[in-house]
Image (spheres, rainbow, N blue to C red):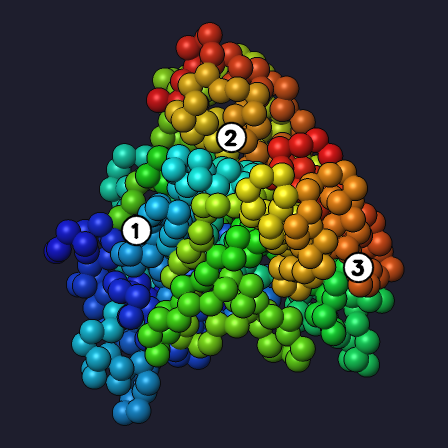
Amino acid sequence: MTDDAKRSGLSRRSFLCSGAAGALSGGLAAGLLPGDAAGAAAVTDAEAPDTVGPGPVEIELEVNGATRRLAVEPRVTLLDGLRDRLDVTGPKRVCDRGTCGACTVLEDGRPIYACSRLMIESAGRSITTVEGLGSPDAMHDVQQAFVENDAQQCGYCTPGFVVATAALLARHPAPSEQEIEAGLGGNLCRCGTYKGIRAVVEGAGGGGVSGG
Amino acid sequence: MRPFGYAAPATVDQAVGLLEAEGSEALAGGTDLLSLLKDDVERVDRLVALRGVPGLSGIELDGGTLRVGAMTTLQELRDHDGAIAALPALAVAIDGVASPQLRAMGTVGGDLLQRPRCWYYRRGFGLLALAADGRSMVADGDNRYHAIFPEGEARFVNPSSLAPLLVALGAEAVVHGPAGERRLPVEALYRAPQAAGERENTLAPGELLVGVEADVEGSRSAVYEVRQRRALDWPLMAAAVSLTGSGPRTERARIVLGHAAPVPHVATAAGDVLAGQELTPETVAAAADAAVEGARPMSGNRYKVQLARTAVRRALGRAAGMEI
């Protein structure tokens, strides 16, 4: 595998495998009939990249430090893939439209809405969810601070807020008021636990909570 | 989401080739497109992923020229000290996208070409939102966030955070297509559709916005956005201004309104008012009045006319470094 293919998490071999599986499950005629536009293009234009899907495509990505391989349809979001296929249910599906932040995960260290990223786009990348920050027995400083400051109520937004807070503190270990608002502006809490969450972040300056 | 194919081109030429096919759509940060696909407002046969295409992202400050690749994320641009120092108004425009997640995912090209937020469009009634009898659902309905400068039946507003500033600066868009490269003023990326099925941008099938280029020297610019709340949302109104001229007199002023019309609205008359003038509370107020000349608000958005005046006044104040 070339370095590029490794990074993309999509090997030519897996492209071909998934293509064959798609043709078989979708009926033998699919892609084989003379005049089939996609098939013809693939034969005549060696330069053109493969179009994969709409059936499952084998991808590889790192989730919370472990390499995971799975076959997903291109339309599956990172959020649904994590929750439904990999049983990583920390990220929550709330608005599913890139507004509420409950699905926040880190992709290569940057906070993103997992609902608004196709899982296939995260192939070859490293994903950290709230589970990857710490465990109940060995909590991340941010998780511990959420507990100590009672910074949750119903808890639905909490995993996203914890990840967003960790990302904020990694960038700004002692954030200003303005940096806190900018850093957590992508997450909503309908219970109104903002006061507790602010206490978590403000404790960071003097109190040992850090994003690392 | 309905099923679709996915292709990850390795070059801009490959991307252009893939985008020529009907039913193919470019995927940048995905924050807008995926929502449209989930809601079945738009349908695609194949997404052409731009994320892995080398050369589409990056920031270059070359003398007084700022070049930004279309796949550069808003956060990357915000974190580029050189770009922000050369064009402080960029920080205001980007910070208005008040979510670190959206700034990390959203791209410059995606911001410029995001689809309108009109709730009739988002509910599947099309950009013109015409009822079966041909009447406008927008004019007859809830138009509180719609255009005060509608063009024909196009009554939505251009939602881009960066477009007003780039248009005020006279920035160019660089587009690659089947016939090669073409450059056009950023405002020429947009049009007000007049028939069902027409889009609000001027890119032909197979054409791809690859970047923008702006002259950031020799002018003072500013952005002012009026918001309903500080939390993540699109502004109600925005103004961007760019002033040239040394000394107290303004040689040339470009004033552009965002969220006011189906395209970034160049307020030519407002700029003319300031040409050769010193910025004073009186000339600024005259420019603000001129900026809304000819406004045709609808039943529920008359307040936006005053917001536009205020945004222009405050943007001019910021650019001139004076409290107005």
Q: Can residue B5 be seen in the rendering of this structure?
A: no
Q: Which residue is mark 1?
A: A123
Is label 3 in a helix, a strand or a loop? loop
**Picture disc at residue A183:** 2
| Residue B16 in picture, x, y percent from top left | 34, 72
- Give the letter of the chain under mark 1: A
Report the Cα–Cα distance between label 1 and label 3.
Answer: 52 Å
- Give the quarter of the image for residue A195: top right
| Residue B179 in picture, x, y percent from top left | 35, 79
Q: Residues within 10 Å of mark 3 (few under 14, many from 20)?
A: some
Please give the name of the residue rendered at 30% of the width and 40% of the height, measured from the top-left corner: A126
In the rendered view, tell whether residue B53 sits above or below residue A183: below
Tell me the quarter of the image containing the N terminus of chain A.
bottom left
Report the Cα–Cα distance between label 1 and label 2.
Answer: 26 Å
Front residue of A161 and A172 = A172
Is label 2 in a helix, a strand or a loop? helix
Report the Cα–Cα distance between label 2 and label 3.
Answer: 39 Å
Residue type marked 2: Gly
- Give the letter of the chain under mark 3: B
Please give the name of the residue rendered at 38% of the width and 37% of the height, measured from the top-left corner: B82
Q: Nearer the viewer, mark 1 or mark 3?
A: 3
* Mark found first going from the N terminus, 1 or 2: 1
Total marks in image = 3
In the rendered view, tell whether residue B63 sits above or below residue A192: below
Is label 1 in a helix, a strand or a loop? loop
Q: Which residue is mark 3?
A: B293
| Residue B167 in picture, x, y percent from top left | 55, 57
Please give the name of the residue rendered at 66% of the width and 64% of the height, measured from the top-left corner: B262
Please give the name of the residue rendered at 69% of the width and 50% of the height, measured from the top-left corner: B274
